[in-house]
């Protein structure tokens, strides 16, 4: 993608790059046009950041799954507790009627 840089515009993109050894990495390219018309660009290897983002997404998905499981468990326990309370109330009423 070619972008025309004008004024104080700063452009940031992520691309896949290939090293001389054939391996690939994710790079972040930040570019801007300088006051004298020259272009300034910086390329950063963000492989570690992308891996950390992926791991964070996985952890969040796992946490959400655990929260859903715990919420379902809590709802089941609450229903059991309501049932036991109801049975206890009925047992107390029967005991009073004796």
Image (tube, rainbow, N blue to C red):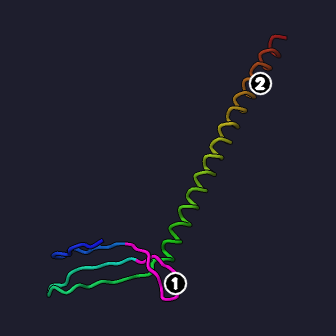
Residue shown at 35% from the left, 72% from the top: 13
Name the residue nearer the viewer: 91 or 71: 71
Whole-percent x and y of residue 5?
20, 75
When the figure is inspected, residue 87 is found, relative to residue 13, above or below; the finding is above
Residue 88: which numbered mark, if any? 2
Q: Residues within 10 Å of mark 1 (few under 14, many from 20)?
A: few
Q: Magenta segment: does it hold 65?
A: no
When the figure is inspected, residue 87 is found, relative to residue 35, above or below; the finding is above
Using residue 95 as the reference point, say whether residue 3 is left or right of it.
Answer: left
Screen quadrant of the C terminus:
top right
* Label 2–label 1 contact, CB within 8 A: no
Whole-percent x and y of residue 6?
17, 75
Name the residue nearer the viewer: 60 or 50: 50
Q: Residues within 10 Å of mark 2 (few under 14, many from 20)?
A: few
Q: Over which residues does the magenta segment extend?
A: 14-27
- Residue 43 location, quadrant: bottom left
Whole-percent x and y of residue 23?
52, 82
- Residue 36 location, quadrant: bottom left
Residue shown at 33% from the left, 84% from the top: 42
* Callout 2 secondary element: helix
Screen quadrant of the N terminus:
bottom left
| Dominant secondary structure, magenta | strand
* Callout 1 secondary element: loop
Residue 34: which numbered mark, if any? none
Name the residue nearer the viewer: 78 or 66: 66
Q: Dot 1 corresponds to which residue?
A: 22
Using residue 90 as the reference point, say whether residue 20 is left or right of it.
Answer: left
Residue shown at 32% from the left, 73% from the top: 12
Q: Earlier in the sequence, mark 2 or mark 1?
A: 1
Whole-percent x and y of residue 65?
61, 51
Residue lying at the far top of the rendered structure: 97
């Amino acid at each position: 993608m070619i972008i025309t840089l004008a004024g104080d515009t700063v452009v940031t993109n992520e691309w896949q790059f290939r090293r001389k050894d054939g391996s690939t990495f994710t790079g972040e390219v930040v570019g801007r046009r300088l006051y004298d018309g020259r272009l300034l660009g910086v390329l950063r290897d963000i492989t570690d950041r992308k891996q950390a983002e992926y791991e964070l997404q996985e952890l969040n998905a796992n946490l959400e799954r655990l929260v859903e499981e715990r919420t379902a468990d809590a709802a089941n326990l609450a229903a059991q507790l309501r049932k036991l309370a109801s049975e206890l109330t009925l047992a107390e009423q029967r005991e009073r009627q004796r």
